[in-house]
Amino acid sequence: MGGASAAEIRVLGCLLEKQRTTPEGYPLSINALRLACNQATNRDPVL
């Protein structure tokens, strides 16, 4: 079995980020998750 794709890692990262920053908005709607994944600004993840 292979590892996760870049898209899968981005989705997971968005879910983790939103869970920590906006817990009252959890669970996310599909639209909110899509917007988070497509966000182009403030993307300097610490790995």
Image (cartoon, rainbow, N blue to C red):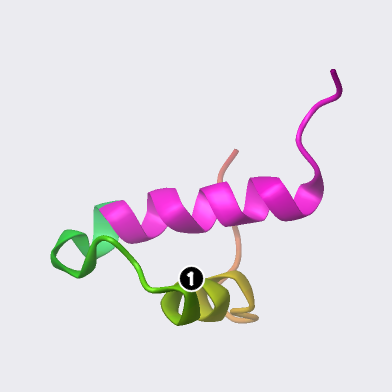
Left or right of residue 17: residue 25? left
Q: Position of residue 29 (x, y in %)?
A: 38, 73
Q: Say if 38 sits above or below 20 in the image.
A: below
Q: Give the residue pinned by disc 1.
A: 33
Residue 46 picture location, percent across and down: 56, 45
Mark 1 secondary-structure assignment: helix
At 53% across and 50% down in the image, what residue appears? Answer: 13
Above or below for 21 versus 5? below
Q: Looking at the image, is 32 positioned above or below residue 5?
A: below
Task: Say which quarter of the image contains residue 26.
Answer: bottom left
Q: Is residue 18 left or right of residue 46?
A: left
Q: Residue furthest left?
A: 24
Residue plotted at (27% across, 52% down): 20
Task: Write down the quadrant of residue 40 in the picture.
Answer: bottom right
Q: Amino acid at mark 1?
A: Leu
Q: Which stretch did the figure color magenta?
A: 1-19
| Residue 34 sits inside the magenta stretch | no
Farthest residue in the top direction? 1
The spot of residue 17 in percent (x, y) is: 40, 55
Quadrant placement of the C terminus: top right
Magenta span: predominant SS is helix
Describe residue 7's horizontal placement relative to residue 12 as left or right: right
How many residues crowd mark 1 within 10 Å: few (<14), some (14–19), many (20+)?
A: some
Of 16 and 42, nearer the camera is 16
